[in-house]
Amino acid sequence: MRDRAIDSPRGTRVVPGVVTADAWRGTVEVVDTALCEGHFPGTPIVPAVALLACVEAVLYAWRGAAVASYAALRFRAPVGPGDALDLDLTRRTDGSLAFALRRAGKRVADGRVEELRR
Amino acid sequence: MIVLESWLPHRSVAVLITHVATQSAATLTAEARVPAAHPLVRAGRAPAILAVEAAAQATALVGATATAGPAARAYVVGVPRCALDVADLAADAPFEITVEHLRTEGPLSRWSFRATRDTANIATGEISIWCQP
């Protein structure tokens, strides 16, 4: 387990909560419209890949790891400016990590992450 | 000839496709790049996962071509698999994105994608797109 500061993507504030060797729990807050510039005019929506960039920032700070692959990603509801999300990352028995982003308890995105082996 | 600004719902730094190289009814190859002013760029580098966004925009262009009109607003709703061969991309550096239609069920369509630079893989996988009816 590493103890790096989280380099939150622009327009977000990623804050750790309960962190162990096998699980990371914290929050992702979309603090402004930076991530939504041009996506889309009049209907600002955080691009799905920006949510993954938050997951990658956590993974690097927590485990010093980059992402090798993703699997079974689902983006279940749009995320916009002002949204506050709970992020859980949990190590699975196969060595990969499962993640879920929830807004008010309801999943907005989830999937699996495989770390880059070094 | 596709005029990207009129065919994609994206604007400004969110537009990653720069021009279409080849296209058919079910495939499209385009040049893309991540603008230096994109919000995910840090110190001139962008997360490689942005290749998925470029793939999504390429699928929108295939749809726009098929209907001979501006692309409907569409969202990435799933990534069944995605392998990243690099950690990040240089901002403003061109890369190639190719998408191929696999199947459509109602408003959902599944595509394979491959992002490359100088023939080396950046990212490969499949994406699911939900198109606003």
Image (tube, grey):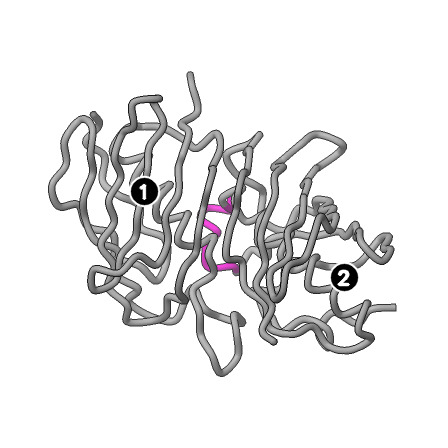
Q: Does the magenta stretch mainly form a helix, a strand or a loop?
A: loop
- Residue extent of the magenta highlight: B38-46
Does residue B118 appear to the left or right of A97 in the view shown?
right
Q: Residue at x 78, y 78 (%)?
A: B69
Q: Residue furthest top?
A: A118
In the rendered image, residue A51, in percent from the top left (x then y), is placed at: 39, 53
Q: Residue furthest left?
A: A18
Q: Which three-letter amino acid code belongs to the residue tagged 2?
A: Val
In the rendered image, residue A68, in percent from the top left (x then y), is placed at: 48, 29
**Residue A3, located in which quarter of the rendered image?**
top left
Image quarter hosting the N terminus of chain B: bottom right
Q: Secondary structure at mark 2?
A: helix
> Quick check: can you spot residue B11?
no
Chain holding disc 2 = B
Q: CA distance from mark 1 to mark 2?
A: 32 Å
In the rendered image, residue A9, in percent from the top left (x then y), is placed at: 36, 53
| Mark 2 crowd level (few <14, some 14–19, many ≥20, 10 Å Cα) | many
Residue of label 2: B62
Does residue B31 appear to the left or right of B126 in the view shown?
right
Q: Which three-letter amino acid code belongs to the residue tagged 1?
A: Phe
